[in-house]
Structures are given as C-alpha cells and as structure tokens.
Amino acid sequence: MRIDIITIFPEILQGPFSESIVKRAISKGLAEIYIHQLRDFTSDKHKKVDDYAFSGGAGMVMMIEPIAKAIDFLKSEREYDEIIYTSPDGDLLDQPMANKMSMYKNIIILCGHYKGIDERIREHYITKEISIGNYVLSGGELAAAVISDSLIRLIPGVIGDETSALSDSFQNGLVSPPVYTRPREFKGWKVPDILLSGNDKLIDEWKFEQSLIRTKQRRPDFDNK
C-alpha cells in the first residue's frame, strides 16, 4: 500500500510513522508513506496557500490552485483508489471502512486546515471524506495518521500474529473482552478461573459472553446498530 499525504505541516506526521507497527510495515516494504508539502505547489512567492473567504467572516480558506496542482502531479504518476479529505463532516471512520480500504493499493490523504478547503476541490477531486470523530482538530494531520495506522495494521504480514487484528474490537460487531496476563494474582485480584482451565471451548464462550456484556454496557450505540 502506498499512502501520499498532502499537508502544510509535514513535521507533525514524522513521529507517528517512525515508531511501532507503521515503522515495521515500512521497513518490511509492505507500506509506503510519502508526505508532500503543499507549499511546494503554490505559485505565490511567499508560499501562501490560503486566502480570505469570498463570503467574509472569520478564518482563512485553503486555496484551490496549490491543492489541484499537488493532486494532479500525483495522479500523473499513478492511479489512486481514493482521494481522501479529512473533514469533520465526512463519513465516520469505523472498522468495516478500514477493512475495505486496507486492500487498496494507492490512496491520497489531503489534510485540511483553517476553515477548510475551497469547495471546488471537494466537488471535483475528492472521492471520499472521512472524519475520525465528532469533534474538531486544529488540522487534518492527526486524522491522517489515525487513518493510515488503521489501514496499515491490517495488511497481511504487518502484525506478527495475523489473527490478532481479526480479534480486535469491532471486527465481529462487538468490543473486545477483558484480557489478563501474569501474575495470576495481584493484591488479591485474581484472573478468572475459566481462563486458566485450558478448555478452549468454554474460554471462547466466556470471551463471547463478555464481549456482549461490554458492548451493551460501554458502547450501546454500537450494540444497537
């Protein structure tokens, strides 16, 4: 998978992609991430990429020309499965969406800023808009990192035990059950006996029951879907 990210603050994205699972995926050649500075595509001598909105009001708007140039440049080199814009009013990122997009070969993620981007970009270039939650961030970089991580970790070979990703919360429509490790007892708090029984059938039944309980208690919004 190749992910091209267009941003005016590339430094924000250095950290999330230089550690842990994403770094491992890049090192293995299973994922490629390229970060493009939007200011490299502006014709303004001061590298300006925003301007006042025609309608007036507070806040600046990201200009159409540099964004169009950046996307056109990338599209001239390869085909993309999706051109994504990180937006509070986009489709809410969830596990089924991540599962589907993890099979893509090439995607572009455009990071918004200020009051947003010129609407003509959304109308003529963007193929999918994604929100990572019902709140507003200072910019789309953190959302781009979240989206990238959610896809890359699902690529076969990225996680050592590939069944691990399949047992994550939401993969089967439920949140994950509680998990425990050594020691068996700490401050009088004990690991449930069933998990120490060695009976795989009973353990699986217990885990499923706990997932049902947790989903109902902690994510009733998800349980009702």
Image: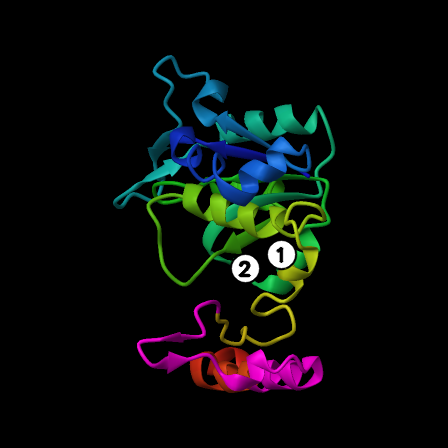
Q: Is residue 217 left or right of residue 70?
A: left
- Compared to residue 112, the image places residue 198 above or below, namely below
Residue 18 location, x and y as percent? Answer: 48, 34
- Compared to residue 146, the image places residue 76 above or below, namely above
Q: Report helix, strand or loop for mark 2.
A: loop
Start and end of the magenta stretch? 181-209
Q: Report helix, strand or loop for mark 1.
A: helix
Please tell me whether mark 2 or mark 1 is closer to you in this view: 1
Magenta-colored stretch includes residue 15: no
Q: Residues within 10 Å of mark 2 (few under 14, many from 20)?
A: some
Q: Amino acid at mark 1?
A: Ala
Reading the image, the residue beneath label 2 is: 93
Reading the image, the residue beneath label 1 is: 98
Residue farthest to the top, as pictured: 45
Cβ atoms under marks 2 and 1 closer than 8 Å: yes
Q: Is residue 141 left or right of residue 209?
A: left
Name the residue at 71% across, 43% down. 81
Location of the N terminus (image quadrant): top right
- Compared to residue 69, the image places residue 144 above or below, namely below
Residue 50 location, x and y as percent? Answer: 37, 31
Name the residue at 38% across, 43% down. 139
Q: Is residue 128 left or right of residue 52?
A: right
- Place residue 29 in its image quadrant: top right
Magenta-colored stretch includes residue 199: yes
Q: Amino acid at mark 2?
A: Leu
